[in-house]
């Protein structure tokens, strides 16, 4: 049985590698036509997709999975429309493949440059959201990459049905269906076999909880784009505009507390803590935020819980917030360096030199001045779409859009030059 499974995964990877050679050569117009047709088919096949999805949802309900999980699993009208619109938006984005990003002439007359090319074959391993199947396939296809998709077992029927729609359009247009493939089994061993195939897979992107990402990172023989967690800070400086600080602190924590770019720790300069903390606490109370504060914080928010050392550096993904009063910008920087996760950090200040110091010294995939951490998102930053947020630095740092799904190769134009 295991040998059969291993052969299946290997065969899929080989076919993906072969398909990737065709994708490298496709024109932007052909790629865009595919994406637009897939968007149309998603809408036309909404009833079928929801019927298939209901099998996954009903099984999840019998297993007692949480309402939040069921919500992520469900292909509602809204989700299907969002997938279709997402593909249409990707079709409108500039195609990075073939772009020459830089050129220079050498003293011998040789013209040297760098050209964007696809990565090749990308494996994406993700959990319960079936919409990732279409989002990831669309981004990979537009950037000229073949994709192997391994979703969670709870969404297997939905993922296969969505991939079949994409593959149907590819077949109609005479393109290799193997450009988009879903691993058709929930067996964990299939994922392990996939992660061994560095000869055929150029990159793996895990999307899900910290446990999944660590498993993939430990097992993979090819590069992994990852972020383990989002422990995001907002530092309110003594030179902050407190009205800005208030709205940003509330938005960063409360708009969507269960996402990776939500704030988990609020750092407040001691000079403004007496006025700012009671005010922001009143706003948090409206949302039911539980505050866990340092001893200095408790002076100004008496009903807050005393923070434990483990509260700093923890990703709550909930309406829970760690708060610490700091003596200086330097202390805030030290705290972030110790507890941050290289995801998103923000400073609220009207002092230019402190803002620039924060930007230069904080190591995170997005560093903001006077704005919410919730902006660390491909769409919000103007990428159009993203396949995930990387907190690794090779080869991408931050939201990964089309450009980040490519690399560059050197090209050179000569006129008979030889090396002496």
Image (cartoon, helix red, strand yellow):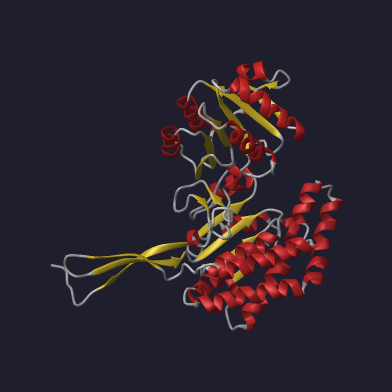
Quadrant for the C terminus, please.
Answer: bottom left
Q: Percent position (x, y) of residue 322?
A: 64, 28
Residue 133 vs 286, above or below: the answer is: below
Residue 300 vs 410, above or below: the answer is: above
Q: Quadrant of residue 77?
A: bottom right
Q: Percent position (x, y) of residue 406?
A: 46, 63
- Residue 49 shown left or right of residue 359 in the figure: right
Residue 311 vs 23, above or below: the answer is: above
Q: Tell me the residue at 80%/59% (across/down).
A: 56
Q: Percent position (x, y) of residue 275?
A: 62, 22
Q: Tell me the residue at 47%/77% (across/down).
A: 25
Q: Tell me the residue at 47%/30% (across/down).
A: 333
Q: Percent position (x, y) of residue 209?
A: 65, 45
- Residue 81 shown left or right of residue 86 in the figure: right
**Is residue 375 or residue 71 the one in the foreground?**
375
Does the rendering let one see residue 351?
yes
Does the rendering let one see residue 177?
no
């Amino acid at each position: 049985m295991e040998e059969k499974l291993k052969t299946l995964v290997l065969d899929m990877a080989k076919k993906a590698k072969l398909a990737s050679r065709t994708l490298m050569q496709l024109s932007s117009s052909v790629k865009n036509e595919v994406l637009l047709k897939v968007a149309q088919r998603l809408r036309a096949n909404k009833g079928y997709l929801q019927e298939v999805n209901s099998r996954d949802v009903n099984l999840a309900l019998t297993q007692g999975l949480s309402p939040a999980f069921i919500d992520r699993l469900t292909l509602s009208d809204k989700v299907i429309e969002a997938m279709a619109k997402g593909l249409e938006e990707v079709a409108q984005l500039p195609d990075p493949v073939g772009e020459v990003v830089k050129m220079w002439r050498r003293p011998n007359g040789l013209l040297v440059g760098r050209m964007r090319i696809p990565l090749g074959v990308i494996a994406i391993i993700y959990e319960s959201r079936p919409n990732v199947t279409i989002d990831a396939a669309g981004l990979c296809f537009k950037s000229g990459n073949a994709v192997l998709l391994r979703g969670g077992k709870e969404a297997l029927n939905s993922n296969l049905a969505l991939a079949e729609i994409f593959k149907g359009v590819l077949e109609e247009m005479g393109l290799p269906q193997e450009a988009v493939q879903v691993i058709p089994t929930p067996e964990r061993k299939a994922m392990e076999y996939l992660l061994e195939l560095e000869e055929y897979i150029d990159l793996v992107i895990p999307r899900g909880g910290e446990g999944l990402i660590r498993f993939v990172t430990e097992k993979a023989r090819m590069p992994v784009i990852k972020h383990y967690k989002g422990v995001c800070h907002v530092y309110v400086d003594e030179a902050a505009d407190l009205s800005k600080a208030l709205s940003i602190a509330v938005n960063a924590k409360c708009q969507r507390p269960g996402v990776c770019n939500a704030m988990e720790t609020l750092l407040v300069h001691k000079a403004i803590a007496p006025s700012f903390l009671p005010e922001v606490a009143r706003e948090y109370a409206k949302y039911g935020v539980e505050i866990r504060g340092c001893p200095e914080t408790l002076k100004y928010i008496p009903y807050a819980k005393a923070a434990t050392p483990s509260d700093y550096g923890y990703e709550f993904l909930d309406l829970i917030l760690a708060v610490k009063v700091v003596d200086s910008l330097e202390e805030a920087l030290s705290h972030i360096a110790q507890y941050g996760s290289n995801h998103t950090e923000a400073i609220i200040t009207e002092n230019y030199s402190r803002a620039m110091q924060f930007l230069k010294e904080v190591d995170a995939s997005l560093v903001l001045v006077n704005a919410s951490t919730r902006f660390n998102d491909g769409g919000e930053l103007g990428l159009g779409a993203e396949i995930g947020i990387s907190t690794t630095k090779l080869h991408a740092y931050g939201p990964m859009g089309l450009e980040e799904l490519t690399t560059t190769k050197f090209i050179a134009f000569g006129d008979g030059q030889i090396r002496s």
